[in-house]
Amino acid sequence: MRKDIRYVGLDVDSEKIVVAVAEPAGEVRSLGAIPYREESVRQLVKKLGPARRLRVCYEAGPHGYGLYWQLSGLGVHCDVVAPTLVPVRSGDRVKTNRRDAEKLARCYRSGDLTAVWVPDAEHEALRDLVRAREVAKKDQLRARHRLGKFLLRRGLRAAAGMKSWTAKHLLWVKTLRFEHAAQEATYLDYLHEVEHAAERVARLERAIDQAIEALPTQMRAVIAGLQALRGIKKVSAATIVAEVGPLSRFSRPKQLMGYSGMVSSEDSTGSSVRRGAITKTGNAHLRRIVGEAAWAYQYRPAMSPELKKRQEGLSEEVKEIAWKAQYRLCTRHRRLVAKGKLRQKVTTAIGRELLGFIWAIGTQVEREQRSAKLTRRAA
């Protein structure tokens, strides 16, 4: 620890920032609150500076990374820390903004905080878009449920063998009529919401296609490489890249598994080892995408025409990893099911192992892109 470094903890809300400073070997003191405005932050850095002597941290939250980018632009080293990993004393029952800022500064000085990955502009923009599409899909499901349960209460059922929410099913729904005007109005409102939700999802998916085309070459290459895996198409691959960022930032696949929250919790002491359900302390969006993709590996390995088309133009190394994933994960799925494991637990186990193949393909594509870039420079 350098003797001339000052460690600054910030407790941020929508209107103000509470500031605390920890000197290298001195006490931790509060500096009060400043308005959450660019000019106020600039004056704070000037007061505490020079910028090269400052180390600033604040907790990740709904305010995003605007403060991080401003401090970085002023030449200040800033870390955004994970709130769930901030140490908490069991006897501490008083929580205020001032005490939180002081705790951040103290823990930052002692090295007890864990910094999160801060996305660049491209990753953050793509992440906002894929999360908007995820919200739209949830709203679409709710709209369909409302209409479906309304028809069920009226005793209206589609013909046997007709799948729900297909084009044929929607044509049947649109032919329905009701005796009472109140029910007719309810039906038309629910139907309008279903159609509106479908249009919204389609519009966002078109926007995702356009956003991917505008991405840097390396990000596009990783998205294309991940689609070599069974169960991962364009939207899923874009979500993984947007949520995780460069996969090479994880030195081992187990770190990616831990980041997703799909690893088992553990409470062990001495010779006693007790493992429980998955921790769910990682990225929930990544965990959802991987869980959905894992269901595809219950079927025997195969190369569908669609999958072959997605693998066109990819290197042989990436194709080999994708085929190895099919064979290994399908075999493991069948073995776990044969042992009597619940299918939900089996799918979680397959999803956790699938993350290892995602890491392998992502790092392979990133190496290929770096090699290609060096070759172009040499030429």
Image (tube, helix red, strand yellow):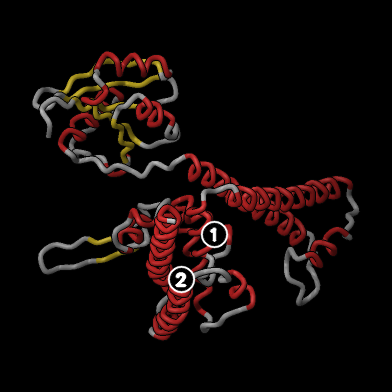
**How would you rate the neighbour count of disc 1 (Cα within 10 Å): few for under 14, some for 14-19, many for 20 or more?**
many
Q: Give the labeled residue for mark 2.
A: 318
Q: Give SS at disc 2.
A: helix
Q: Quick one: which residue is furthest to the front in this view?
A: 379
Q: How many marks?
A: 2
- Residue toward you, 129 or 214: 214
Where residue 170 sits in the image (x, y, percent)? 80, 61
Is 109 placed left or right of 227 in the picture? left
Q: Can residue 142 be seen by looking at this rendering?
A: no
Vertical comparison of 259 with 56: above or below: below
Q: Earlier in the sequence, mark 2 or mark 1?
A: 1
**How would you rate the neighbour count of disc 2 (Cα within 10 Å): few for under 14, some for 14-19, many for 20 or more?**
many
Vertical comparison of 351 with 340: above or below: above
Vertical comparison of 236 with 77: above or below: below
Residue in the image at 85% along x and 63% along y:
171
Q: Can residue 344 be seen by looking at this rendering?
A: yes
Where residue 322 sits in the image (x, y, percent)? 47, 74
Q: Give the labeled residue for mark 1.
A: 236
Q: Amino acid at mark 1?
A: Ser
Residue in the image at 28% along x and 31% along y:
77
Residue in the image at 34% along x and 13% along y:
43
Where residue 101 sits in the image (x, y, percent)? 27, 26
Is 171 placed left or right of 215 in the picture? right
Residue in the image at 32% along x and 56% along y:
250
Q: Quadrant of residue 367?
A: bottom left
